[in-house]
Image (cartoon, rainbow, N blue to C red):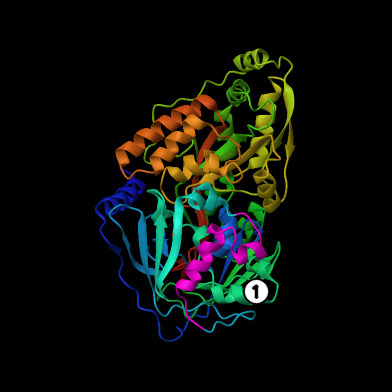
Amino acid sequence: MSSFRWLCLGRLTSLVFAFGIAGTISSVPSFAAVLPDKTLVFCSEGSPAGFDSAQFTTGLEFSAASYTVYNRLVEFEHGGTKIEPGLAESWEISPDGLTYTFHLRHGVKFHTTSFFKPTRDFNADDVLLTFNRMFDPNNAFRNAYPVQFPYFKDMGLDKGIAKIEAIDPYTVRFTMKTVNAPFLSELAMPFASILSAEYVDQLMKAGKASDINLYPVGTGPFIFVSYTKDATIRFDGNPDYWKPGVVRVSKLIFSITPDAAVREQKLMKDECQVMTYPRPQAIAALEHDPQIQVLHQVGFNLGLLGYNTTHKPLDQVEVRRALDMAINKKAIIASVYEGAGQLATNPMPPTQWSYNKGLKDAPYDPGKAKEMLAKAGFPNGFDLSLWAMPVQRPYNPNARLMAEMIQADWEKIGVHAKIVTYEWGEYIKRAHAGEHDAILIGWTGDNGDPDNWLGVLLGCASVNGSNFSKWCYQPFEDLIQKARATTDVAARTDDYMQAQEIFKQQVPFTPIAHSTVYQPMRKTVTGFKIDPFGPTQFWNVGFK
């Protein structure tokens, strides 16, 4: 049984029997720690669209903000999937599974920066501000800075939460309308990063509410200093961090380096000590460098090709099946992933509990695909746009090459694809708006629950968010809603198995591959762990 299933079973058992879930209370330092006078440089792959975790869905922003500047009520353990206390030191779940009561940690300090100096410690006001901004459409901060909250909406929290209230300055209660089995894990995700209500008040009074996306303030292990787009993000280690021993460098610098070959050269020259997303063909050379170590593990991810089902003729299932059948996925695995990828057939990875092992791909058959197009009314094919990501992602090391191979495959059946790309932030923004016909995108699981795949990527609530296929199919929707509202793991598994069968019949997207994750770094770096959910974290990371 995978660790992800153990996580879910443990959580659901706690919910069913209403055991209080409590963690060891970490003492909050009463004085600033003395940090090692060390600077760690991280060669990252691109410029973040911003630092407001609630409005983003990609690992690039999560690495640059969520796991540097911020904390959440509960956290995933460093490098793992287990839930542990964060800004909440303990919590209880009611016997009916509808009420979550969190007891907040005392003495936690928000960052002091050049643009904000807190006058109080973290308390319930900050939790209410963070969640009411997403939950309440009339919230003043939300109206002052109107943005989308895709995760909050995609997971149905906008409709599933009944109320959020402060019982006292250090106790917060969430009341749900219905049972939401993944709720505790959802609160550990980046979108739930806790903001400073005092800082928000300052921004509101100055008429600069949008600065929350430019100048972040949190309680996390690193303090934001500056950001130069396409160049650097600078952080100072947080000497007041509430969890002792986590911060092991005095300065952290993100050196934004979109070209993977350049990142590799910088690492070998010790211009950066950690890099992200090496080219598959460079792995062997990096592993043989005596100064470099390369961590790796099977990725909890999926690279996919989404079909915008609101655009004709992609609204026809026969057309989607033909396009799917015309793609030579084995050739893509060999050329794009170069041995570091596994063929994908399902809308989730094999390590996710409830994965349906019985599903099979349609055979690669351009001749039959062309016949299917003719029967669907397109004997001469048609034109469409094919979007390719401008950056490497853990689920796709070379989207441009993949797009070119798919373009060539489709040309054989008369479908003419125009390859389109944009800067990463613009790419995601336009994709959310549904401007694409077909799109290369992907996903790394966020919390170990099947709902994070089927609900977020394919649910009706997320058609304006991470459901890039814009696919809302009621028989599928009924199953995932039913699964979300029960704590019975066997029943949930059965629902998700059926939902995957419907997915395979309807083909809202073509699963391409699950990629192995490689993490090169200098051998002088200590304490680094690959995050199974994708972002790059620097908790506990230092030098020999």
Residue lying at the far bottom of the rendered structure? 31
Residue indicated by mark 1: 203
The quarter holding residue 528 reads: bottom left
Work out which quarter of the rendered image holds the N terminus and state it.
Answer: top left
The location of residue 397, given as percent across then percent down, is 59, 44
Relative to 435, residue 521 above or below: below
Q: Which residues are magenta?
A: 120-148
In the depicted view, which residue is nearer to us: 54 or 414? 54
List x then y, in percent, for residue 402: 64, 36
Residue 362, horizontal then vertical, whole percent: 52, 22
Q: Would residue 346 be visible to someone looking at this image?
A: no
Q: Is residue 141 left or right of residue 13?
A: right
Task: Tell me if residue 512 comes above or below residue 249 in the rendering.
Answer: above
Please tell me which residue lies in front, 372 or 301.
Answer: 372
Q: Is residue 346 above or below residue 39?
A: above
* In the image, residue 121 lies in the stretch drawn in magenta: yes
Residue 499 visible to the viewer: yes
Q: For the residue marked with disc 1, what is the amino acid?
A: Leu
Give the residue at x 40% y 43%.
484
Residue 446 spot, x, y in % from top left:
47, 51
Placement of 162 over or under 306, stated as above or below: below
